[in-house]
Amino acid sequence: MLLAIEQGNTNTVFAIYDGERWREQWRTATVSARTADEYAVWLTQLLAMRGLNFQDLEACIISSVVPQSLFHLRNLSRRYLDVEPMIVGETVEPGIPVRITKPSEAGADRLVNALGAHLSYEGPLIVVDSGTATTFDVIAPDGGFEGGLIAPGINLSLQALHDAAARLPRIAIRKPDRVIGTNTEEAMQSGVFWGYVALINGLVAQIKAEYGQPMTVIGTGGVVSLFEGATNSIDHFDGDLTLRGLLEIYNRHQAASSPSSS
C-alpha cells in the first residue's frame, strides 16, 4: 500500500492507497516541530482502528510546502515504513511544463494540483485552492502550469481581524443567512464570507478575460466547500486533486524505474 502525505501550512493529510482506491484519509493540524515519533504514535492508532499497521505500507510520497517539517516526515517514512520517500520537487518531479519566469518558485502543492486537475478535466483550467492562502492557478490545455494569483486565505483574514482589532472576537467561518449583519459576529462572518465570494467571482472573471478563451474552474482545498452554492464561478468542487496528482507521480515513477522500461 502507498502512504501519500499532502502537507499544507494549515493541515496535513495522510492517505492510504491500496492499489485500487483511496482506502483511508486522515487530517491533522500542521505543526512544523512535530517529530517523526509523534507522527508515528498518532498514525499507529489510526491504522490500528482500520486493521492496518506500518508493515502494510510499502511506499511513501510526500508533497510539502513546510520545509522545516519535511525532515520529520522523511524520518517517519525511513524509520517506521523502512522506505525512502518520494518527495515532490526533490527526488521526483510532477512532470508538467512550468511556464513562469522562475519555475523553482512554483510550490509543490500547486504543481501537483495542476497535474491532478489536468488528469480529470479538459483545459484550459483555473484551479482555486482555498487554504492558508487562496491561490488561483492557470493550467494550459496540455497540462502546463502558466502561473496565477495568491491571496490571503479566509482563515488568515479572520485571524488578522481578531489580532489587529482588540474588540473583534474570534469567530468560526460559516455561510451567513444575510449579507447585512445585525451584530459584530454576523458582520464579521458576512464580510469575510461574502468578501471571499466576491474575490473568487472577480478574479475568475478577470483571469478569463485576460486569457481570452473559455476556461473550466475547479475548486479544491480545505475550506472551498464552504462556497458551494454561493458562487457560480466554480464549475466543479473536487477535494481529491492533490491526492490524484500524487498518485499519478508515484505511478509514473514506478513505471519509469521498472526493469521492463529500461
Image (tube, rainbow, N blue to C red):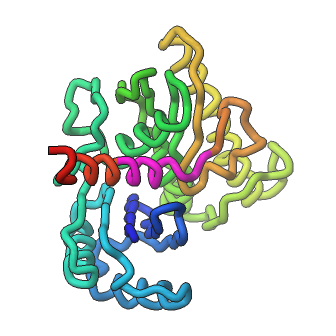
Q: Residue furthest left?
A: 262
Residue at the image point whose x is 27% and y is 72% from the top: 73
Residue at the image point whose x is 61% and y is 67% from the top: 170
Residue at the image point whose x is 67% and y is 59% from the top: 173
Count every numbered label the image shows and give the total.
0
Q: Main secondary structure of the magenta part?
A: helix
- Give the magenta-colored segment's residue range: 238-248
The foreground one among 166 and 61 is: 61
Which quadrant holds the C terminus?
top left
Q: Is residue 255 left or right of residue 209?
A: left
Please identify the quarter of the rendering in which residue 142 is found.
Answer: top left
Q: Confirm whether the magenta stretch covers residue 246.
A: yes
Q: Is residue 15 above or below residue 161?
A: below
The foreground one among 255 and 182 is: 255
The foreground one among 75 and 52 is: 52
Q: Is residue 77 left or right of residue 147?
A: left
Residue at the image point whose x is 31% and y is 33% from the top: 96
Which quadrant holds the N terminus?
bottom left
Which percent across, then down, holds residue 156? 49, 55
Q: Is residue 181 above or below residue 2?
A: above
Q: Confirm whether the magenta stretch covers residue 117.
A: no
Which percent across, then down, holds residue 75? 20, 77
Which percent across, then down, holds residue 93? 24, 44
Please identify the quarter of the rendering in which residue 139 is found.
Answer: top left
Q: Residue furthest top?
A: 212
Which percent across, then down, holds residue 18? 47, 68
Q: Is residue 242 left or right of residue 39?
A: right
Q: Is residue 36 left or right of residue 246?
A: left
